[in-house]
Image (cartoon, coloured by chain):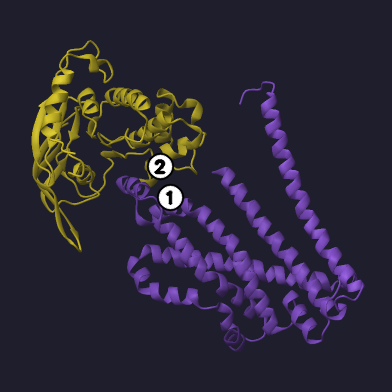
Chain colours: A yellow, B purple
Amino acid sequence: MVDKVVEIKNVSMNYHTLSGETQAIRNLSLDINNGETVSIVGPSGCGKSTLLSLISGILKPTSGSILVNGEPVAGPSSNVGYMLQKDHLFGWRTIIKNATLGLEIQKKLTKESQAYVEHLLDEYGLADFKHHYPKQLSGGMRQRAALIRTLATNPDILLLDEPFSALDYQTRLAISEEIWLIIKKERKTAILVTHDISEAVACSERIIVLTNRPAEVKNIHEIFLTCDKRTPISCREAPEFRHYFNKIWKELDVHV
Amino acid sequence: MYKVEASKEHQVYLQKHKIRKTSIAFSQISIFIAFFALWEIAAYFKWIDPFIMSQPSRVIKTVISLTSDGSIFLHTGITVLETIIGFLSGTILGTIIAIILWWSDFVAKVLDPYLVVLNALPKTALGPIILVWIGGTTSSIIVMALLTSIIVTILNVYLAFKSCDEDKVKLLTTLGATKLQILSKVVLPSSIPAIISVLKINVGLSLVGVIVGEFLVSRAGLGYLIIYGGQVFKMDLVMTSVLILAIAAALMYLSVNWLEKKLNKMR
């Protein structure tokens, strides 16, 4: 497998509306390495989500190119899994039916893939809830079910678009820990978009700070935290944590 | 909820709730009885002319005579059947057209002004035209019922399709779904409650279409009995038919309501 799983080369993205043209991303280049967890932070509305949409192939860049596993992106592919802000589990489907949605759409629902999804649900604490409906589950469990739906099609790269922002703070801390552990265990590359600086520092090996719109790379931070177990919650106690936090906070240059 | 002995305060609360519920039901039944009793008494003492206003006891007599020759079942059955066919076909056809509009935004934009005008137009005004085109048959009546309900169906179902959560659609797009898959996996299932509530509106609308159709075609059905009774000045027959119609309409509405509850439970 190639070392760089995502290569973004000189990408620009313009939006057209009747009132004019907006440049969302300007000449942005970025590489994501295999197996790493990268966070993207930036001022709100700076084009973070647009960047994820470009990587996932649901949008095409105005100029520049994006390669996933060395191949140019030509539309949604099963190599890339996308996780949205809310869980978006369908209320009319049971958890197992929700989890196999991607397989169903990609017409890959076989005995083996079904067994794989069942295994994921068993492994990550949803064994007893397979045939329940989403509304019977807690917010955290639903988010886990949404992750399993994303993992079901076995993508190499996970795009997480503020996946915890719809949860309350305590649940958010707990579920980001759980999901981080699952991502590491399944050896996935993850790109996390967040506006929560401490979440970004806690969860990732690298943080990419974007500028105001049109988005360019402002800075890239390699995160080294000294803690026994490198998991999001425990490494919040690392002495370097607040240095990174302050540095990124200053770079974001927030004016209210 | 924990199973513990209810506190005194809570018992008072429950008691209050129960009293309120009973008094509402009591008032409802009282109004019903008072209305018919007053009607009967007023006609009995000739305060009102029973020949023009009819009378509950004469309505009962009419029901008995209509039952004995079986015609009550025939006419009610015909009206109910026409209504069911009308609102089912209105809902199904309307949903299909709404799917076409959802599929092509261009078509939706082009047809928008026509739909607005057709929605505003009282469909009963089209009755004579349909009668001439299709003839004095049951088909005319069903087409009337269909026309009264289809435009509302198209507009409401299309609105429901459009208000489907964009992020849910985005989720399917990221999974590589085709337009047909987006329709069948998320847009249609998430619009089922809207379609059911349209069904509820359509029961009433189709009934309007059916009764107007029966007025015009004048062959059978409760609408026919009403117009016939009016023409020959048999007000007993008119009142009886209207009362049966009210019961039939309520029963049809309640069954759709029951279906809605049943479906909502499943979700």
Residue highlighted by disc 1: B185
Q: What is the C-alpha distance between the residues marked 1 and 2?
A: 9 Å
Residue highlighted by disc 2: A101
In this rendering, the answer to whether B163 lies above or below A7 is below
Label 2 Cα crowd, 10 Å radius (few <14 / some 14-19 / many 20+): many
* Residue B152 place in picture, x, y as percent: 51, 68
A188 or B59, nearer to the observer:
B59
Tag on residue A89? none
In this rendering, the answer to whether A125 lies above or below A94 is above
Quadrant of the image for the C terminus of chain A? top left
Give the residue drawn at x 68%, y 33%.
B13
Picture quarter containing residue B11? Answer: top right
* Residue A174 place in picture, x, y as percent: 35, 23
From this viewpoint, is residue A32 visible? no
Label 1 Cα crowd, 10 Å radius (few <14 / some 14-19 / many 20+): some
**B216 left or right of B103 in image:** right
Q: Pointer 2 indicates a residue of which chain? A: A
* Residue B126 place in picture, x, y as percent: 56, 83
Picture quarter containing residue A250? Answer: top left
* Residue A212 place in picture, x, y as percent: 13, 43
A148 or B122, nearer to the observer:
B122
Say what amino acid the circle numbered 1 marks.
Lys
Badge 2 element: helix
**B145 left or right of B17 in image:** left
Could you tell me if the residues under marks 1 and 2 are in contact, i.e. CB atoms within 8 Å?
A: yes
**Residue that lies at the very extreme toward the front in this rendered image:** B47
In this rendering, the answer to whether A66 lies above or below A164 is below
Say what amino acid the circle numbered 2 marks.
Leu
**Residue that lies at the very extreme toward the top in this rendered image:** A228
Q: Pointer 1 indicates a residue of which chain? A: B
